[in-house]
Amino acid sequence: MNKIDLNKIVLDEGIDESSLEITESVDYKLDCKDTKDVNIYILKNIKVSLTEIEDTHTDDKVYNYFISDNSTLIINKFYDLSDIKEEINIYLNGYNSNVILNLSMISKGSHVYKINVHHNNKNTNSMTNVHGVTLGSNKIEIENRRNEAEKSLNAIISKKEKHQFLFLSAI
């Protein structure tokens, strides 16, 4: 069972999929190290900040974030890992829904991130900030995709991306 303790969300360990519905504005620290698929639903008219700090990770993890009307989600991910393969799907389903994704990592191996932002309603905003340091011959790969349905919305959609990387090698 998922539990929330003093602004910390701990998802069940060792299960394949876990879902969480957030109903109030608050800042949470997210702990879901052993969960492969995570679904998070942000309900109407709230602002939520989720922070995840990890130094161990389950391969092939998928995060799905669903954001409702007049809500904002700020996602802060800080990773210090060897190898990781992660997919992040953000669904801006509500009118005036917003997301800010801050992804920071230190790569000690191969890092592959697929970031998909779906603007599914009018007046939606997304901002993606990716910062990384890779050591030696390790790599960081970012694939940032947008959905094609955005064109048919005839809506105001704001998308901003910023990627910064530092590559360090031993002398």
Image (spheres, grey):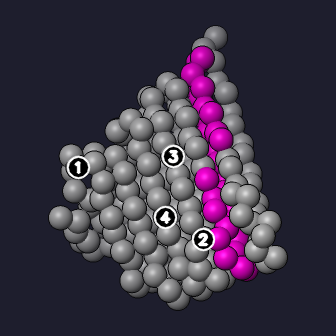
Mark 2: which amino acid?
Leu
Q: Residue at x 53, y 79 (%)?
A: 68
Marks 2 and 1, Cα distance to the nearest angstrom? Answer: 26 Å
Nearer to us in this view, 82 or 35: 35
Residue for badge 3: 87
Query: Regarding mark 2 in the picture, which secondary structure is present there?
Result: strand
Label located before the other in sequence (3 or 1): 1
Q: Residue at x 53, y 32 (%)?
A: 111
Nearer to us in this view, 127 or 168: 127
Region rendered in magenta: 116-143
Residue for badge 4: 65
Pointer 1 and pointer 4: residues touching (CB < 8 Å)? Answer: no
Residue for badge 2: 92
Q: Is residue 157 magenta?
A: no
Pointer 2 and pointer 4: residues touching (CB < 8 Å)? Answer: no
86 is higher (above) or lower (below) than 94: above
Q: Position of residue 95 (x, y in %)?
A: 64, 83
Mark 3: which amino acid?
Glu
Left or right, 143 with respect to 73, comes to right
Residue for badge 1: 15
Label located before the other in sequence (2 or 3): 3
Q: Residue at x 69, y 57 (%)?
A: 147
Marks 1 and 4, Cα distance to the nearest angstrom? Answer: 18 Å
Query: Regarding mark 1 in the picture, which secondary structure is present there?
Result: loop
Nearer to us in this view, 77 or 146: 146
